[in-house]
Image (spheres, rainbow, N blue to C red):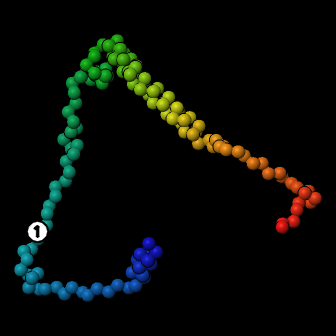
Amino acid sequence: MGALSGFLLFLAAVQSEATPIRPNVKKLLSQPEQTEIHLGPARAGWNGPEIAQSSDASPLALFGTATDAQEVRESLISAFIPDPRALAFLLAVILLLRQFRNWRASRSQVVPTGTVVKFPGEQSPQELRPAA
């Protein structure tokens, strides 16, 4: 990786030279002259709105085919009440994720196996013996 970045830095630092392209006059004269393309102005919105206005100007038309305010209210209430199956699914996912987290936490605790030897913290000089 270092060699590649060093090589790229070397290429960036060195002045590059290219041979100039010499134009071929015969080839240029044999090509037909390109005509300029004329583009007309954009016409969006010049002749009125692009989207036709509907004849039904009722604000209740946004909420479906119901024309009565009571029907619109009932349709909105039914849209806001969640599906019990979706709620049960979300609750099950939350509970399973919590159970999995608790299971992983209980497995990560180190359980000592075998005998544990406790060494004394300090020894007095009289208890120390020279190595034989």
Looking at the rendered structure, the secondary structure element under dot 1 is loop
**Residue 2 image position (x, y, % from top left):** 46, 75
**Residue 20 image position (x, y, % from top left):** 24, 87
Q: Nearer the viewer, residue 16 or 66?
A: 16
Image quadrant containing the C terminus:
bottom right
Give the residue drawn at x 31%, y 20%: 60
**Residue 101 image position (x, y, % from top left):** 54, 36
- Residue at the disc numbered 1: 35
Residue flagged by tag 1: what amino acid is it? Thr
Q: Is residue 109 above or below residue 40?
A: above
Give the residue drawn at x 16%, y 55%: 40
Task: Judge left or right: residue 64 versus residue 33.
Answer: right
Residue 44 visible to an observer of this rendering: yes
Q: Is residue 50 above or below residue 82?
A: below
Please tell me how crowded label 1 is: few (under 14), some (14-19), or many (20+) other residues with Cα within 10 Å: few
Q: Quadrant of residue 122?
A: bottom right
